[in-house]
Amino acid sequence: MDTYAKSKLNKVRLNKRAEYDRKTVHKIIDDGLVAHVGFVDQDWPIVVPMIYARIDETLYLHGAKAARFAKAMGKGIQTCITVTHLDGLVLARSAFHSSVNYRSVVVHGHAKPVTDKDEKIEALTLVTDRIAPGRWDEAREMTDKELRSTGVISVPIEHAAAKVRTGGPIDDEEDYDLPIWGGVVPMRQVFDPPEDDGRLAPGTQLPESIKKLLAGNSG
């Protein structure tokens, strides 16, 4: 199927902004960097911002194996993951009609720990390369001790829906005669010039991964 099935869990109330096709959902996920991961631990709701990666219909999260998210989500519990992009401030002539332009995705699935070594390394490679494309190959190889102490959680996408808002404000017709500015202030993510840590080995050059990040500023 090219779309995710609608259910009580993922149905968007404002249908004109809803998107259920996999291509749109995957694009919003892949364009993001930080996801907010929600789960319940000891009867309390927890939401943690995390870097992630996607392989087909599965999202991967990583962190210390001893961390709360790894212990709780490793039990196979229900999980909600959201990714949001802010694309602009929508300033209407009234506060009521002011908004933001955005692209967002909400995913639901049952988490489980990744125990297969090859799958774990593939997930960690993708997560690392999301920070800077190609960074995994530039960095030193992960040790067995580091791999053992790192927890990787997979969350199959069981339910998903996207919401997208574009365009300018939609004011009440009579408000267009008011001398109040209305429109959109676009937003985008850019990277500033890199700052080394002051301890570079002699002859160390700026890596290709950082150059790729900076090249994206012009997009």
Image (tube, grey):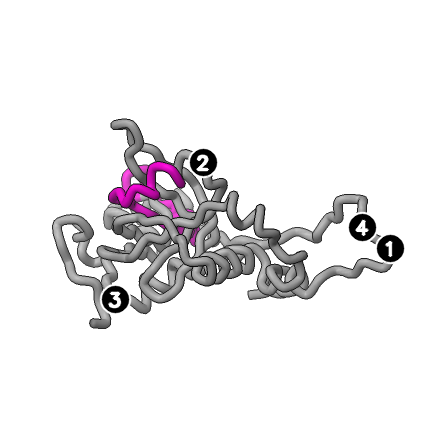
- Residue at the outermost bottom position: 1
Q: Residue at 40% across / 41% down in the picture?
A: 70
User: In the shown orientation, is residue 205 left or right of residue 142?
Assistant: right
Q: Which residue is mark 3?
A: 21
Q: Which circle's residue, 2 or 1, is located before the other in the chain?
A: 2
Q: Would you call the spot at circle 3 few (<14 residues within 10 Å), some (14-19), or many (20 or more)?
A: some
Q: Residue at 24% across / 47% down in the picture?
A: 172
Say whether marks 2 and 4 touch (CB < 8 Å). Answer: no
Q: Does residue 141 appear anywhere in the picture?
A: yes
Q: Would you call the spot at circle 2 few (<14 residues within 10 Å), some (14-19), or many (20 or more)?
A: few
Label 3 sits on what residue type?
Asp
Label 2 sits on what residue type?
Ala
Q: Which residues are magenta?
A: 70-97
Select label 1 or label 3 by which is in front.
1
Q: Could you tell me which secondary element the residue under label 4 belongs to?
A: loop
Q: Which residue is mark 2?
A: 67
CA distance separating discs 2 and 1? 37 Å
Q: Does residue 179 appear anywhere in the picture?
A: no
Q: Which residue is mark 4?
A: 200
Q: Could you tell me which secondary element the residue under label 2 belongs to?
A: loop
Of residue 177 and residue 205, the one placed in the foreground of this image is: 205
Percent coordinates x, y for residue 194 in the rendering: 70, 52
Q: Could you tell me which secondary element the residue under label 3 belongs to?
A: loop
Say whether marks 1 and 4 touch (CB < 8 Å). Answer: yes
Percent coordinates x, y for residue 166 in the rendering: 34, 58
Q: Which residue is mark 1?
A: 202
Q: Which circle's residue, 3 or 4, is located before the other in the chain?
A: 3
**Quarter of the picture holding the N terminus:** bottom left
Label 4 sits on what residue type?
Leu
Q: Would you call the spot at circle 4 few (<14 residues within 10 Å), some (14-19), or many (20 or more)?
A: few
> Residue 22 lies in what quarter of the image?
bottom left
Percent coordinates x, y for residue 135 in the rendering: 62, 60
